[in-house]
Image: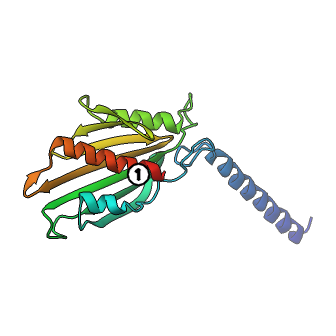
Amino acid sequence: MGPLARAGVIAAGAVVVSALAIGGGLWAAQDDPDRPHPGDVHTAAPDCGDLGELLDEHLPGAVRDLAERGPLTGGEGTVCRWTSAGTSDTPRQGVLRVEYSALFTDSTAEEPVSGEDRVSAAATALAPDAAETVDLSTGRGLVWRGGSGDTELAFWADNLLVRVSYTAVTGGEPVSPDEGRATAVAFAERIGASL
């Protein structure tokens, strides 16, 4: 075999080895918990969306000052925040923060864990023991009073966890816990309807 034929065999061998390595990597990545599984309803976290008149009603003059999307361990997340603090002369000032976490099925575990199960476990771990169950049109949610007087609400739909945090003051006084809860539920209902 001449030098030209040897070079051809070496080049062909390199192409075959490269193709096998790439193909093997793609095959192995199909069970990657950081990638959506075919059974996951939500393959990405949603964007911030438009909360329209609901935002105008509860946080007049609010502007969105944060909208970030990025990877999570085993999923993808979006964080959105609207604030009216210092943006308007209205007596109500406050902040609304919404976090979306699309958690994907982990089929790399000995016993695969669905995205829905991961979201349910994350919501339960997130909420304190004092959290109350709230019925939403999208299903069940948990609501509680945060440490700094804000209202927190978490609900899930399929493999998507949504966390709503709302805090506001009117005339220098924090909104009542009942009003905070009702407002967080209203935002959760609006968000749930858009999923």
Name the one closer to the observer, 171 or 13: 171
Which residue position holds label 1? 191
> In the figure, residue 120 lies in which quadrant?
top left
Q: Is residue 24 visible?
A: yes
Viewport quadrant of the N terminus: bottom right
Residue visible at 43% across and 40% down? 137
Label 1: which secondary element: helix
- Residue 47 picture location, percent across and down: 44, 60
State the residue in front, 126 or 182: 182
Q: Say left or right for 140 vs 179.
A: right
The x and y percentages for residue 80 are: 34, 59
At x 21%, y 64%, the residue is 84
Q: Residue furthest left?
A: 172
User: Which quadrant holds residue 89?
Assistant: bottom left
Residue at coordinates 30% horizontally, 35% vertically from top-left? Answer: 127
Residue 90 relative to residue 189: left or right: left
Side of 95 where 117 appears, left or right: right
Is any atom of residue 100 visible in this view?
no
